[in-house]
Amino acid sequence: MAQKNHEKGSTGGLPGATTPDRVRNVVLVGHSGAGKTTLVEALLAASGTIDRAGSVTAGTTVADHDPAAVRQQRSVALSCAPLEHAGVRVNLLDTPGYGDFVGELRAGLRAADAALFVVSAVDGMDAATAALWEECAAVDLPRAVAVARLDHPRADFDEAVALCQRVFGDDVLPLHLPMLGDDGESVAGLLALVTRRVHDYSAGLPAAVREPDPQHLPAIAESRGELIEGIIAESEDETLMDRYLDGAEIDTDVLVGDLEKAVARGHLYPVLPVCATTGVGLDVLLDTLVSAFPPPLERPVPAVTGLDGSPRPPLAGDPDGPLVAEVVRTTVDRHLGRVCLVRVFSGTLRPGQPVHVAGHGRADRGRPDHDTDERIGHLHRPLGAALREVAGCVAGDICAITGVGGAQTGDTVSATDEPLLIAPWEMPEPLLPVAVVPRHPDDGDALARSLDGLIAGDPTVRLERDPQTHQLVLWCMGEAHADVVLDRLRADGAELDTEPVRVPLRETFTQAATGHGRHVQQPGGHGRYAVCDLTVEPLPRGAGIEFVDRVVGGADFGPAVEKGVRAQLARGLVAGQPVVDVLVTLVDGRAHGVDSSDAAFQAAGALALRDAAERGAPTLLEPVDEVVVRVADSAVGAVLHDLPGRRGRVLGTEADPDAEGRTLIRAEVPALELLRYAVELRSLTAGTATFRRTFSHYTPTPTPTN
């Protein structure tokens, strides 16, 4: 989001919405390549928001203005594209379809009040889209389906509808059927099932609405009955079904009204054929978005708490109520600074308004809790990269704000005299590590600044500074996400390189051993004298380090020897890795009345430990994680077959209690084998599996074989 004007010849800024009932927030979801961005572009052109539609392949679309999106020719970030139709503002939220950018998808779902699933009439849908439907169902989000790419030679609308009904359920019903043109191949119009009219696009947009031709009537009658029954089943008028079954003709206005209510309540899911390139169905889709999808006031506001976590009464989305807004995306513009895309849930935002910005609960991602009072600079209506200044943003609407330098994606913006927190949306765990280093020693400051901006804008990234390997590791969602993250850092001026991620190892003893440490020096003046003897024994995994002093009487040099021993254990004995799970016992020692000191006995303790290591058969230990793979039943065999090749040990399988048709596989896998598992598991299961990992224990590294 950045510049002041858009190259495509926008018709100018949309007037500010004054009431929430004249706003619709619609998120477009679907797999990569389904045609979401192309459809957004076509809707913008059809509504007159832009002069002409851009192209994904040419990199000229409104939504895909991110340089990484242009380079990859696919969406990599959430984009807001508002348009106006029939006096209603429709905020179209275009989301990436590739799994690596699920964080942007979840942000779009948070900002929306309804979802438009875009399904390709050529390629169908992927498993992630099917899972997302269930996710939307869990929160009662209204949904509709747009079957796109009807102009493709292999397009099959009937098969796409049948697929949607198999995957999404029987309440997915087409409102229109494609009508072929005179050539018998191209789609020239739509057959409206409720009104029994033809929308003819032979002369372009808007469609000419007319009576159907005789040859169209059988197709309309065949599909209309199921749709009418679905509408009547959701009607508040319990007499409609009886009248319909008795053969009475139900008034079209009644059917349309009940249809719109059923869609808005998330009880019925219309399917609309649409072709972005020819314009077929664009006006019908716009009408449906405005009339059938609910305004923000009909959707619950996310739960809010005080800054201390204390509960607060539910909010109603009132423009005159307490201010509560949420940052759903953050970018940095070279001219304007930090630009935040904000969904206002309650109250009204205005330029120059003092606000409280709070972000809690994501310290594990490298984002410490923060609370600041700031002042909004300007409010803008975003249209892709273009920003048009507006005078206010009411509850239910979406805008971009500038001047709030401390805001990050996921933060809550509220009133300074009544600061609140919105319950954060669920974020997936990043599981692909990428180690980055400054290209030159003096590039460290620039890298640190770029990382701060990156973490502020992308909450799916986790920043970790490993204290043992001393590596700076960015945990990403996958390879495509990692490529975008690195591109953004470099575009921000960070000169960096990547290096292989190192897994932190440990050392331990495999057998008991004794060690003798003698530190005797006479440099002149007071000398250094310390002698000690100790034994080292291996302990069970996870026992840690124990030190026992069995020397009685004489000088009390045990604490100094222990300090030296523990320091040497931390430095390692063979490979420079910390030593764990050993019992060190001090059994004897000698001191000098003048030349002995704590420093001398620390050195003697370290020498004795190194001496014992020569006989204690030390070995390296590697970390092992407990892994839980959540996978579709159809891919269980592939995962089980793959785990032994990663030196994994399967602990068991069970049906997923939260999702039918999915299985949980529990296993123990060395961390070294999981560095690229996020990428390889997606390939192995066609994107149907996810996993989580937690540290379990250390185990000896395998002995090399010739």
Image (cartoon, rainbow, N blue to C red):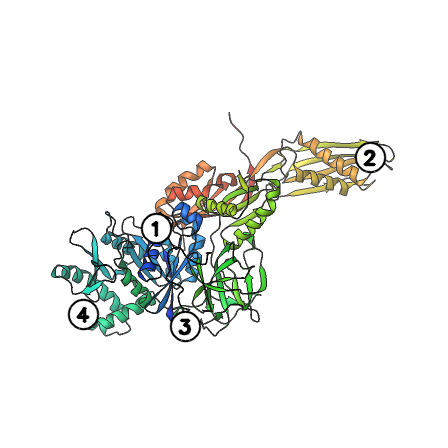
Q: Which residue does the numbered mark 2 point to in the structure image? A: 528
Three-letter amino acid code of the residue under disc 4: Leu
Q: In this view of the protein, which residue sits in the foreground, 272 or 128?
A: 272
Q: Secondary structure at mark 3?
A: loop
Mark 3 and mark 1: Cα distance apart in space:
34 Å
Residue 246 higher or lower than 520, as above or below: below
x, y percent for residue 459? 50, 54
Left or right: where 590 falls relative to 511: right
x, y percent for residue 654? 41, 49
Q: Are marks 4 and 3 in contact (CB under 8 Å)?
A: no
Q: Nearer the viewer, mark 3 or mark 1?
A: 1
Of label 3 and label 1, which has the lower sequence position?
A: 3
Residue visible at 56% across and 59% down?
Answer: 405
Q: In this view of the protein, which residue sits in the foreground, 570 or 251?
A: 251
Residue 655 higher or lower than 649, as above or below: below
Q: Which residue does the numbered mark 1 point to in the structure image? A: 55
Q: Which mark is residue 19?
A: 3
Of label 2 and label 4, which has the lower sequence position?
A: 4
Q: Nearer the viewer, mark 1 or mark 2?
A: 1
Residue visible at 77% across and 41% down?
Answer: 560
Of label 1 and label 2, which has the lower sequence position?
A: 1
Of label 2 and label 3, which has the lower sequence position?
A: 3
Q: In this view of the protein, which residue sits in the foreground, 591 or 215?
A: 215
Of label 1 and label 4, which has the lower sequence position?
A: 1
Crowding near the residue tagged with mark 4, few <14, some 14–19, many ≥20 C-alpha atoms within 10 Å? few
Left or right: where 550 falls relative to 631: right
Of label 4 and label 3, which has the lower sequence position?
A: 3
Crowding near the residue tagged with mark 3, few <14, some 14–19, many ≥20 C-alpha atoms within 10 Å? some
Q: Which mark is residue 245?
A: 4
Q: Nearer the viewer, mark 4 or mark 3?
A: 3
Three-letter amino acid code of the residue under disc 1: Ser
Residue 4: quarter of image: bottom left
